[in-house]
Amino acid sequence: MNPTHNHFPEGPSFRSALNTRYRVASVWQALFFSALLIAIISLTALIYDIVDGAFGYVAYDYKKDPATFTSTPLEDLTREELLTILQANLSSGAYNKLNNEKAMETRLQGELYTLFLERLIQLDIKKTWSFTESIMRAGAIRTEAAEKYPAAKLEFRSWLTPQFLTSPMSSKAEFAGVRTAILGSLWLVGIALLFAMPIGTGAAIYLQEYAPKNWLTKIIQTNINNLAGVPSIVYGMLGLAIFVRVLEPFTSGSLFGVTDSNGRTVLSAGLTMGILILPLIIINAQEAIKAVPDSLRQAAYGVGATKWQTVWHHILPNSIAGILTGSILALSRALGETAPLIVVGASTFISVDPSGPFSKFTALPIQIYQWTTRPQSEFHAIAASAIIVLLVMLLTLNATAILLRNRFQRKY
Amino acid sequence: MKNQFKNLDLRKKPRIGEDAIQGLLFIAGILSIFTTLAIVYELGKEAWLFFGDPEVTLAKFFWTTRWQPGIGQFGVWSLVTSTLITSFIAMLISLPLGLASALFLSEYASLRARSILKPILEVLAGIPTVVYGYFALLFVTPILKNIFGDVVQVYNMASAGLVMGIMILPLISSMSEDALSAVPRALREGAYAMGATKFETSIQVVLPAALSGIGAALIIGISRAVGETMIVAVAAGAGPKFTFDPFQAAETMTGHIARISGGDLSYNTIDYTSLFAIALMLFLVTLVLNLISQRVVSRFRERYE
């Protein structure tokens, strides 16, 4: 063939241009991938940072010598011994106060021991080290601790202990726990779900099955999409204005004879959270209902079912897995949400378990926020432990959602 | 024969139960409108009280730069600038990274690689923001201090913005990826047939075709950044400050609301109403951004069918 008629460009200049194009292409491909790499590194750094904070060496000493209270070694103290020591050495006012919170006789050995450490010998944290430091510079830490705090004991500890999960709040990091916060969070998401799931599912059914195609439906739909994008703190302000202030007689429980609270209750916060996750639940439920094929509806109508019979017997059973999955995902959003709770007025220091919808409350993310913003490093350590607890809860929720989806998802 | 059909009534039977259920469902549907109305009404009412205060003037609000309602200073700019700076830094991080990872996931990654990489982004998206706040204050800020030295304050806008960028990255990435994968395959095949490399196809053919979706992602990202509270509340500092230096501490609008409302706040004070004025601003800004984004998607979507 005559080379002048060849339509394909050739020659060294074309070759080198082509090579440049290939080079550029592969460089950019690497760049695109590195964006994902940065995301992976960030996630790793975040998890590392949390683990790093939750474990490590701690140097502490006792303000008072244990020997002044008892001659038995600390590890061997029994419940009865501890009880007598506490009774003998605590001021009667302090003892009665503790007794009122929970009868001393019913407390376990561990609880009494904590009280003994906290109130009597007053364990005092001198310094904490992060996990990495503790591993890499164990020797240096030992010498540093020996020089600076000769009286102090050095101990490698995990801040995340069973005791951390079961103790209430305390002003001392080493005795603080997340029990109250976990219970508060559970109350909160429970109320939010009770409020938002029926309404959200109902709204989704209305929009998918009943709503005529008109301007009102269009407005409702646009509005729901917009509400999903409203910053959570704005919901907090709404909750403060409506639930805490206007509906105070209801949310404080004074309508029902509760006298000792104001509107800043777990009920107000739960309802605020419910309003916040409502659009998410509606959107997810709509998707689930949309996935039910039309043939099912037509078949139901064909045998003379009414609209509601169709919805109740065919559409809901076929979309319930999707609706539940969506609701669980919305729930995990509510569990991690912090800003609206601050605005609605979560208590920052509360050591009594929430006992009902009209209790004051704190929640896990609130505790994390509180502890993170403290300057002392031992509070950062318990913040990290609380974060691990929160992340594990979220992980469980999301895993449940995924399992539900895989188990019950129907393909048509 | 005819008698048999005499009593047959073919009109729709009145079903009270059905109607009641439909009514209840309608109420559930319309409730979201009431949420919006309640937000507008409550924020508007308190903001009205705020601007009705003889000490507050719109001119003061928009043209001065110190915010301290307690002593009669109402310059909202000290809060707005820090919101803008943190959001700007966040978008500076999340837009290029999110777009690049979306391009990789939709154009380059194999199915297997996608199934590993996407969940990582989803995990990032599912982490509560207060955890990001912890990360910003206790990990990123020390690193910034190491790199830039003592100009970096303990609380600073840069670290809050950076971490916010990481938080928004998955959002931008997944929205952009949706837009990119909606571009029909025929366009890519056409480009390959012309001899374009994968990169040229992605940038010159697929990306322009998905531009509206990416624009929407950008706008939603900005709206998220503006409304984000916990990261800035933890890491950006307490106390409004009019500064453009990202290494300084300055409180954003959301951070200010969180800090003031977290304290003892009595109703009907200027502190209380001023928070609602700020929240109203936030609400309006994010509302407009969200509306624009929805409009962009529906108006400028390239249609191929």
Image (cartoon, grey):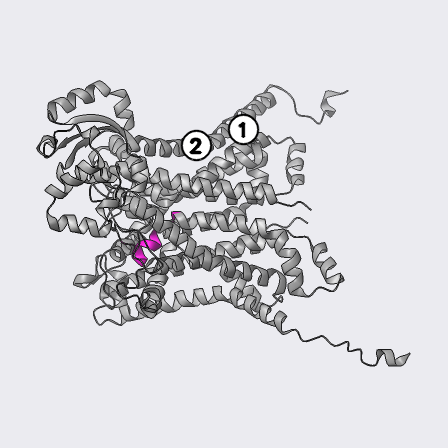
Circle nearer the viewer, 1 or 2: 2
**Mark 2 highlights which residue?**
A40
Left or right: residue B198 compared with residue A264: right
Vertical placement of residue A3 versus B249, above or below: above
Vertical placement of residue B215 versus A221, above or below: above
Q: Position of residue A379 (x, y in %)?
A: 24, 39
Tags 1 and 2 both on a single chain:
yes
**Mark 1 highlights which residue?**
A25
Q: Position of residue B207 (x, y in %)?
A: 55, 41
- Residue B291 seen in the current view: no
* Residue lying furthest left: A68
Is the residue under label 2 in contact with that under label 1 (CB below 8 Å)?
no
Distance from the alpha carbon under mark 1 to that under mark 2: 23 Å
Q: Residues within 10 Å of mark 2 (few under 14, many from 20)?
A: some
Q: Position of residue B31 (x, y in %)?
A: 48, 66
Vertical placement of residue B80 versus B168, above or below: below
Question: Which element type, helix, strand or loop, lies under badge 2?
Answer: helix
The quarter of the displayed image where residue A114 is located: top left
Q: Find the magenta span and give its range.
A: A336-347
Q: Quadrant of the N terminus of chain A?
A: top right
Look at label 2 and name its amino acid: Ile
Q: Residue at x 42, y 54 (%)?
A: A190
Vertical placement of residue A102 versus B185, above or below: below
A313 vs B70, nearest the viewer: A313
Q: Which mark is residue B261?
A: none
Look at label 1 and name its amino acid: Ala
Q: Position of residue B3 (x, y in %)?
A: 87, 81
Q: Residues within 10 Å of mark 1 (few under 14, many from 20)?
A: some
Residue B104 covered by magenta stretch: no
* Residue lying furthest front: A80
Q: Chain of mark 2?
A: A
Question: Which element type, helix, strand or loop, lies under badge 1?
Answer: helix
